[in-house]
Image: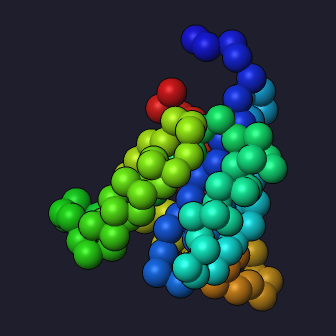
């Protein structure tokens, strides 16, 4: 097992927003970090977050259809993954994100408090990062 301290960032990539979660190799407890709007400067924004937060590993959730098939959003995420790998100099991984948004919405509803769609996105990113950390 690698004992080097690392910081991880996970992205739940959508057409309008990207939910972001963060964790480190000591606590291994992903937390919702923030949600950003997708715009023309999104790659620069993500790159700045990576620099500011000293991120070592980036994880992107890869959506799939109900039967595990590729979808239009899967293709968009793979394209985003290819673009971001060209722009940043850290390890970038794709991980299956099946059901993370539904799970996040159910958890937020169970809390009984008001929430926004951005809260679903950042919590979904937390589940993506949790799954990744459980695999390594």
Q: Residue at x 33, y 59 (%)?
A: 78
- Vertical placement of residue 109 versus 66, above or below: below
Q: Is residue 103 visible in the rendered structure shown here?
A: no
Q: Residue at x 46, y 81 (%)?
A: 15
- Vertical placement of residue 97 versus 65, above or below: above
Quadrant location of the N terminus in the rendered image: top right
Q: How is the image coloured?
A: rainbow
Q: How many marks?
A: 0
**Of the pair 91 and 23, the residue shown nearer to us:** 91
Query: x, y percentage for residue 52?
Result: 81, 50
- In the picture, residue 17 is in which quadrant? bottom right
Q: Is residue 18 visible in the rendered structure shown here?
A: yes
Question: In the displayed structure, does residue 58 sit left or right of residue 52?
Answer: left
**Of the pair 60 and 116, the residue shown nearer to us:** 60
Q: Residue at x 74, y 23 (%)?
A: 5
Q: Residue at x 48, y 54 (%)?
A: 84
Query: x, y percentage for residue 66?
Result: 25, 69
- In the picture, residue 126 is in which quadrant? bottom right
Query: x, y percentage for residue 67?
Result: 19, 64
């Amino acid at each position: 097992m690698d004992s080097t301290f690392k910081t991880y960032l996970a992205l739940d990539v959508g057409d309008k927003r990207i939910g972001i979660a963060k964790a480190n190799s000591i606590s291994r407890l992903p937390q919702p970090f923030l949600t950003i709007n997708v715009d023309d400067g999104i790659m620069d924004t993500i790159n700045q977050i990576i620099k500011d937060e000293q991120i070592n590993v980036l994880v992107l959730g890869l959506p799939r259809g109900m039967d595990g098939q590729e979808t239009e959003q899967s293709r968009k995420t793979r394209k985003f993954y290819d673009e971001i790998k060209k722009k940043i100099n850290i390890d970038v991984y794709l991980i299956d994100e099946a059901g993370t948004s539904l799970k996040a919405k159910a958890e937020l509803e169970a809390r009984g408090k008001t929430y926004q769609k951005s809260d679903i996105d950042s919590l979904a990113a937390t589940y993506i990062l949790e799954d990744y950390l459980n695999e390594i």
